[in-house]
């Protein structure tokens, strides 16, 4: 019996509202987590870490954050790149100003800094909605990138305008800088993602999550039944930015090692993360992971196929890849506006009643 | 799948007592005028709603009934006049503050949260009663979960009361119209309101659905003692359900009293039979 | 007149003309939004795509040459010396109409009745697709576009304005690009033609009917889908004009698609549904941006043009959420 709920009765409300209501799903989930934490670190190598795993973990974090804002609270943001930049530069300034600080604290504090900036740029959402708000967040994107470019204090007056991560550690193990082991950065990012993924799930299933979704689905009715738009929207902006800031910090410190703001955190990043959220599923925690996985793995696969296997030029492969991603966005919106997460739900539903579909 | 014990029939209202006796005014609308640009929607209307009663607001289309409800729960801000609710006088107020004071409502065109399940919709109705802060919610285990379960229990009472157990996990968008109206009532009830505003609760329903809804409204009023103000076009329903009726026409009040009094009021008869206004 | 004042005039004039260029893109947005309620993010990429196609046809490039060579191992690149500019423009217009038809057929048809935000995101996807397609067809290198429009500074204007300066002051005359002047004239003609079209033709009336109310328009026998193809074709035409102007000015390259983003604050100022709004919004943004760069920019180390337009629009929105020409919104429930 692979995926059955027969005999799996819920006798308490608590059991009824748990994350994985079906036992085999619960087992599958924990097996997957155990695999990620206990098995993968032993087999990880530099290519897999840099090309697949780290981007996957970091973009999952960013997608989680953006999904809270766009998918749960319904406030479209095109400023993700800018907020990631805030996280990255906050991280850099903290690393260089307090060399003794451990990396967990640095990353979390970077998240808080980004949350504060997110609240400021979220203020217009109290007056404006929809497309108008999307344009307002574009202002954040361009303004933030400009700030980090223009004011040398942010990059410690380095000649190149780049920020470079010095070596910092946690429990004596280096997780940033040139001499880190793949398994160390991997476990660092995985732990953060696991903890904050769990928190995101908790926040979205309770009162706060419901007030976000109420604002998303019908803001006027939400306000009339007692949701304060100010609190709901600004908390969504703050928490979303917190996640995105952490993603930006890790993207810079643990993944890239060195970054130039316009290149690493341009408008492309905003769209990339937005696409992850759309493809994965708006308003779904699982969808954030699936969307990130999809858009991290697709280019790797395409590149391996076209450049590695067919021997095509890389720019040609890049053009096809852009085209495909754009086409897939349209395809997903037409075929399944709720994304991969919904496809997964439907599959589960089919599996549950298999082999008697009626 | 019976996943809860049989609920007790009485639904406990946790909202603290405001000291207003049944029959005394709970809500006083005093000389309210509201206009949009140059258009007067409501001019100089006064009436009250007494605790424990069912008060109907009727009138032809465009009479200003929905605008009146919008004023009462703070969505529109009148240019003149005051509202006194549970002894507190106010002129301007945000809707969510009114909700916190105990005013809940349903809407003329269903305003459910389409992306959420029935259960979540009704749980959202309890938003004013949930208190755990962000950190507890992030942790979930412990106080936040306990609070969630406590409110789930209350919500399940409402689900039982409205006889919608079978659809509690269904996304509301998939439900037929009549059930959506019922869920909306459930969401308003979940707030344990001191005053419940119903904007055309029976619009677009067939006879059977109307009978169900009438029964629910009466039960809410009698079992929970909830004060209700409702807008309705079906005169039969209004006359049967309500204790007192206020009649609006072109933004003015033209009648106020028991159903019988209103029925015999010449102005009201004229308004409904469409006597020309410029004679 | 003092040189300072003349400098100011020069900045304003250049700003106005830069604004016209923004308006050209914004116009395409407005057309589509009016007729279908779709916020077409791909408008800028459509301009880029049109310009790329035009250059490709003009110079006789083989489309998809890169891909063909990669698959077949061949070495094709050009099929001749290219073609007459007018023929190329004509053919490009054909391509844009084909594109409009395909967009309706493949995308819009399946997304009717979806929420506006879903449609918006679909057009972002479309933008990416077109960007990739354009690069794939014609290559990603920067191309120069020459359709015979005059370019460069106007000496006549420079000489004329030099004499305006007070005697004894040092002033070298105003710089004005003649391309900007022709762009302004073309934009003017375009707006007049579009207005006449929508006022006095049956199709124009149908367009306005659809803009007002989809259901009602359909019930009097207007085919929504035909209208959409027409609107997207017109938007394609506007994109072509914008592509020609921008392409001639700064070369046909990817950054062209970013001007679409600049059109967004223009739309916010002018409103999503007003053609005059798009023009006036463009002018305000153009002038505001140039003035800010000249007078405020130096205090911040310059380059504030990148974000100033957005901030201006944002500040504006906070005071007038309905836009410059929009009516005050009364929320109902």
Image (cartoon, rainbow, N blue to C red):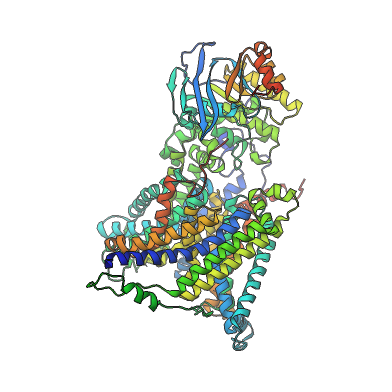
Image quadrant where one finds the C terminus of chain A? top right
Total numbered circles: 0
Give the image location of residue B246, x and y in percent: 60, 18
Give the image location of residue B76, x and y in percent: 50, 31
Residue A224 as seen in the image, left or right of residue C36: left
Q: In which image quadrant can residue A23 be found? A: top right
Q: In which image quadrant can residue B183 be found? A: top right
Query: Is C35 in front, or is A28?
Result: C35
Query: Is C121 in front, or is C148?
Result: C148
Q: Is residue A40 visible?
A: no
Q: Which residue is drawn at 62% across and 82% down?
A: C68
Q: Residue at x 71, y 60 (%)?
A: C226
In the orientation shown, which residue stands out farthest toward the left? C168
Give the image location of residue A326, x and y in percent: 58, 64
Can you say whether A258 is above or below A218 in the image? below
Q: Is residue B227 visible?
A: yes
Can you say whether C286 is above or below B125 in the image? below
Query: Is B138 in front, or is C17?
Result: C17
Give the image location of residue C23, x and y in percent: 50, 62
């Amino acid at each position: 019996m692979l995926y059955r709920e027969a005999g799996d009765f819920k006798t308490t409300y608590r059991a009824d509202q748990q994350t994985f209501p079906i036992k085999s799903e619960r087992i599958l989930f924990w097996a997957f987590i155990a695999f990620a934490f206990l098995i993968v670190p032993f087999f990880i190598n530099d290519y897999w870490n840099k090309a697949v795993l780290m981007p996957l973990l970091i973009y999952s974090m960013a997608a989680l954050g953006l999904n809270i804002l766009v998918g749960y609270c319904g406030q479209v943001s095109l400023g993700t790149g800018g907020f990631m930049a805030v996280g990255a530069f906050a991280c850099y300034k903290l690393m260089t100003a307090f060399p003794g600080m451990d990396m967990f604290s640095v990353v979390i504090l970077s998240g808080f800094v980004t949350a504060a900036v997110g609240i400021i740029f979220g203020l217009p959402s109290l007056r404006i909605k929809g497309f108008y708000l999307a344009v307002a967040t574009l202002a954040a994107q361009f303004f933030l990138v400009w700030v980090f470019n223009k004011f040398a204090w942010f990059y410690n007056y380095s000649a190149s305008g780049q920020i470079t991560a010095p070596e910092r550690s946690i429990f004596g193990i280096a997780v940033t800088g040139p001499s880190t082991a793949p398994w160390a950065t991997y476990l660092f990012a995985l732990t953060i993602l696991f903890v904050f993924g769990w928190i995101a799930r908790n926040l979205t299933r309770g009162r706060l999550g419901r007030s976000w979704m109420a604002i998303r689905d019908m803001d006027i009715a939400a306000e009339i039944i007692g949701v304060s738009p100010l609190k709901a929207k600004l908390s969504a902006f703050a928490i979303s930015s917190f996640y995105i800031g952490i993603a930006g910090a890790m993207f810079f410190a643990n993944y890239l090692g060195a970054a130039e703001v316009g290149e690493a955190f341009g408008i492309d990043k905003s769209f990339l993360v937005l696409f992850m959220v759309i493809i994965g599923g708006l308003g779904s925690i699982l969808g954030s992971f699936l969307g990130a996985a999809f858009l991290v793995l697709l280019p790797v696969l395409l590149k391996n196929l076209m450049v590695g296997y067919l021997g095509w030029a890389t720019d040609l492969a890049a053009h096809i890849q852009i085209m495909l991603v754009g086409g897939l966005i349209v395809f997903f919106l037409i075929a399944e506006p709720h994304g991969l997460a919904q496809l997964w739900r439907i599959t589960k539903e089919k599996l549950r009643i298999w082999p008697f579909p009626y | 799948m019976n996943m809860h014990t049989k609920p007790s029939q009485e639904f406990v209202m946790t909202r603290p007592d405001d000291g207003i006796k049944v029959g005394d005014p709970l809500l006083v609308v005093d000389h309210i005028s509201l206009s949009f640009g140059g258009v007067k929607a409501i001019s100089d209307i006064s009436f009250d709603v007494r605790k424990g009663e069912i008060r109907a607001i009727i009138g032809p289309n465009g009479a200003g009934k929905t605008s009146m409800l919008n004023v009462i729960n703070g969505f529109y801000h009148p240019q003149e006049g005051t509202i006194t609710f549970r002894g507190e006088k106010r002129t301007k107020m945000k809707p969510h503050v009114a909700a916190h004071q105990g005013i809940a409502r349903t809407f003329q065109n269903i305003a459910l949260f389409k992306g959420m399940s029935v259960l979540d919709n009704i749980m959202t109705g309890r938003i004013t009663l949930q208190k755990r802060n962000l950190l507890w919610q992030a942790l979930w285990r412990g106080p936040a979960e306990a609070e969630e379960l406590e409110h789930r229990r209350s919500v399940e009472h409402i689900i039982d009361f409205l006889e919608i157990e079978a659809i509690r996990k269904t996304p509301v968008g998939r439900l037929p119209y009549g059930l959506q109206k019922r869920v909306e009532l459930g969401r308003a009830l979940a707030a344990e309101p001191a005053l419940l505003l119903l904007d055309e609760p029976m619009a677009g329903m067939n006879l059977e659905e109307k009978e169900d809804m009438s029964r629910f409204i009466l039960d809410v009023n009698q079992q929970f003692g909830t004060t209700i103000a409702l807008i309705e076009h079906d005169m039969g329903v209004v006359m049967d359900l309500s204790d007192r009726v206020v009649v609006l026409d072109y933004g003015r009040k033209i009648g106020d009293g028991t159903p019988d009094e209103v029925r015999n009021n010449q102005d009201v008869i004229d308004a409904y039979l469409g006597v020309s206004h410029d004679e | 007149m003092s040189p300072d004042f003349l400098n100011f005039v020069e900045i304003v004039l250049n700003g106005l003309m830069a604004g016209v260029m923004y308006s050209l893109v914004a116009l395409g947005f407005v057309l589509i939004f009016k007729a279908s309620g779709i916020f077409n993010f791909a408008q800028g990429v459509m301009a880029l795509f049109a310009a790329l196609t035009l250059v490709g046809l003009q110079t006789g490039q083989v489309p998809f040459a890169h891909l063909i060579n990669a698959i077949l191992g061949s070495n094709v690149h050009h099929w001749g010396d290219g073609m007459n500019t007018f023929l190329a423009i004509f053919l490009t217009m054909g391509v844009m109409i084909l594109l409009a038809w395909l967009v309706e057929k493949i995308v819009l048809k399946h997304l009717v009745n979806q929420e506006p935000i879903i449609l918006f995101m679909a057009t972002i996807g479309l933008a990416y697709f077109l960007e990739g397609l354009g690069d794939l067809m014609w290559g990603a290198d920067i191309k120069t576009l020459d359709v015979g429009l005059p370019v460069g500074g106007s000496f006549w204007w420079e000489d004329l304005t030099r004499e305006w300066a007070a005697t004894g002051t040092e002033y070298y005359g105003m710089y004005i690009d003649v391309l900007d002047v022709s762009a302004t004239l073309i934009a003017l003609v375009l707006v007049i033609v579009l207005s006449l079209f929508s006022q006095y033709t049956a199709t124009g009336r149908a367009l306005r009917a659809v803009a007002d109310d989809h259901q009602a328009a359909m019930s009097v026998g207007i085919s929504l889908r035909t209208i959409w193809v027409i609107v997207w074709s017109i938007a394609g035409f506007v994109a072509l004009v914008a592509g020609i102007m921008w392409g001639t000015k700064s070369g046909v390259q990817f950054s062209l698609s970013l001007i679409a983003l600049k059109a967004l604050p223009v739309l916010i100022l002018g409103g999503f549904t007003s053609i005059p709004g798009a023009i006036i919004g463009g002018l305000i943004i153009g002038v505001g941006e140039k003035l800010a760069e000249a007078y405020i920019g130096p205090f911040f180390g310059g380059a504030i043009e990148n974000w100033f337009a957005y901030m201006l629009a944002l500040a504006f929105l906070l005071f007038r959420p309905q836009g410059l020409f929009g009516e005050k919104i009364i929320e109902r429930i």
